[in-house]
Amino acid sequence: MADTTDVMKFLNQTSWDDLPSKVREHIKFCLLDLIGVAAGGAKTKLSNIARDYAAMDMGGTVPMIFDGRGASVAGVAMAGGMTIDALDGHDGFNPAKGHAGCGLLPALYGVAQDNKSISGREFLLNLTIGYELACRAALAQHATVADYHTSGAWVAVAIAGVASRMMGLSETQTAHAMGIAEYHGPRSQMMRCIDHPTMLKDASGWGAMCGVSAARMAKAGFTGAPALTLQTEHYKDLGKNWLVTQQYFKPYPVCRWAQAPIAAVLDLKVQHNIESKDISGVHITSFHEAVRLGQKIVTNTEEAQYSTSFPCAVALVHGDVSPEHIADNALKHPEIQRLSSVLTMGEDEKANAVFPKSRLARADITLKNGQVLASAWFEPKWDPSAPPTQEELTKKFHDYATPVLGDTRTQEIFDAIMLLENTDTQHLFDLLSIPPEELKIHVS
């Protein structure tokens, strides 16, 4: 069997005490952010369909996140991953061009609930290990093909490894689990969903389902080793270079590639005190992939989230981009539609050269009086080089969760996460399994 010493040692021997204090604190805010986005995502049609399907066709007794109905562990992982992915506000890793936490959280939540007993400290540790493996699996997999595939492909491998650890699998079984997940992980075409936005999104739910299924099959004796991408140099710094602290967070619930253009137009709006009605044209200069987010007139939230022009128009009208601004029932705002329709885009070689480690954009706004206002180059807000404060992430969590869960339950979830390393997981899991009041009719 191929050598996977670095991965297996990290999986089997890492303890909570091995984590630097910065990592321990950071993982709680990754968890907080994911749960806030999940709350917002639970209101979407995409999430409703995924949770209904899991309840009806993937039967079991493990409660789904923000639903209450039972499903299999694989069903809980799939539905939860799709619920978080339904609102494109979750964290990510620039070099991977994708998202680790979106698939990891619901998969590990499902496995932990099925195992009946796990401490909060152990859950946070497993989530951390998952981030470290997933980010490296992404780099390894992207190096094998030119095509840009979705996050579900590589997060599946990490989930298989961490689920194996949580389930007490042997090293040999774990190697088979990760090999199964690598083989069956959804190497789906991300740019297809950029060009034609649908509910497919980043395949995180499918990857979560694949990862936990691989571990459970390996436990039963199914073979699949080796996972070829584990045999690369990307894993040599495990336990030394903590990639979980290098995740970006999103201030806006849309594709990361649209976030620098939003920052650029907002800077001009604030700097020059622009009213949207005074704007006759907007031009965004960015990298090739951002320009591919070309949907101007959107008809659903998926198209709004995978657009550059629409969220820039939202920002120019509202001064912000929040979940309510890109919800299905908010898409016919006439002034936003006007600005989105006149926005043009072009790519720049400077921006192309630094992608994916940097996502640069600049804006030119033409006013109706003929004046042209030009911005500087912008990176997205809340990049690892200029991360959000804990206060900013806390505010985002409350902004996303409170409209869905209410003040009391939102605060209870926040408190449970902040205390998690010194308690068990049951109280938090109970809070996550109850459907929001407005969804109870749907899931009854």
Image (cartoon, rainbow, N blue to C red):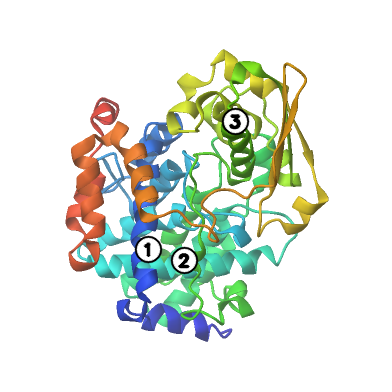
Residue where numbered disc 2 is placed? 244
Q: Specify few, some or many for label 3: CA neighbours under 10 Å numbering under 14, 14-19, or 20 or more.
A: some
Are the residues at dot 2 and dot 1 in contact (C-beta closer than 8 Å)? yes
Percent x, y for residue 16? 31, 76
CA distance for labels 2 and 3:
34 Å
Q: Is residue 104 left or right of residue 260?
A: left
- The answer to which of 363 and 82 lies nearer the viewer is 363
Q: Specify few, some or many for label 1: CA neighbours under 10 Å numbering under 14, 14-19, or 20 or more.
A: some
- The answer to which of 181 and 289 lies nearer the viewer is 289
Percent x, y for residue 258? 62, 40
Camera-near label (3 vs 1) is 3
**Upstream in sequence: badge 3 or badge 1:** 1
Give the secondary structure at mark 2: helix
Q: Amino acid at mark 1?
A: Ile
Question: Which residue is found at the position 19% from the left and 49% from the top?
Answer: 430
Question: Which residue is found at the position 51% from the left and 84% from the top?
Answer: 6
Which quarter of the rendering shows the N terminus? bottom right
Q: Which residue extends farthest right?
A: 349
Residue where numbered disc 1 is placed? 27
Q: Is residue 218 above or below residue 191?
A: below
Q: Is residue 116 left or right of residue 390?
A: left
CA distance for labels 2 and 1:
7 Å
Residue where numbered disc 3 is placed? 269
